[in-house]
Image (cartoon, rainbow, N blue to C red):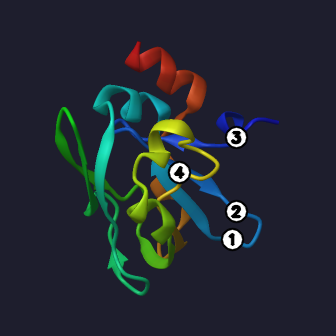
Amino acid sequence: MSITEKILCTKTHEYILKNDDGTYTVGLTDYAVEQLGDIVFLELPEVGSTYSKGDSFAAIESVKAASEIYMPISGEIVEANTAIVETPETLNEDVYENGWLVKIKATADASELDDLLEYEDYKEEVE
């Protein structure tokens, strides 16, 4: 099963993936990265930070634009992908495996995910 069969996507182009340990991995979709172009800067939150669904939690800049990245579910940051901050261009090469942004422990129930789209539906909506 490919990762795109397991993720849920927001209308603001973030994805969320439930991990085996109950945490969630959050990142940007391949479509978002494609639209941004060459990524040159990424700012991620510190471990321990908490966010509500819809909060801006990170900033990204490309040669084309600067954007905020929004939290798809309320939670606490348990890990940030610090390697990608050093080499933000990794996002252009591998958005799902090595290009994830943060891992969070949800502080709300899974009903917060009800308005998210399965990847196939998301792709149809953005094309």
Whichever of callouts 1 and 4 sits on the residue coming sooner in the sequence is 1
Q: Is residue 81 at all visible to an observer of this figure? A: no
Using residue 6 as the reference point, say whether residue 81 is left or right of it: left
Horizontal relation, residue 124 to residue 57: left or right: right
In the picture, the disc for residue 83 is none
Label 3, on which residue? 3
- Residue 7, image x and y in percent? 61, 43
Q: Quick one: SS at disc 1?
A: loop
Residue placed most toward the observer, 112 or 67? 67
Is residue 35 shown left or right of residue 3?
left
- Gap between marks 4 and 2 measured at Cα: 16 Å
Q: Give amino acid for label 1.
A: Gly
Disc 2 residue type (three-letter): Asn
Residue at numbered disc 4: 99
Identify which amino acid the numbered label 3 is placed on: Ile
| Extreme residue toward the right, this view | 1
Which residue is identified by label 2? 19
Task: List x then y, in percent, for residue 27.
Answer: 47, 51
Q: In the rendered image, which residue does mark 1 sit on?
A: 22
Q: Is label 1 or label 4 in front?
A: 4
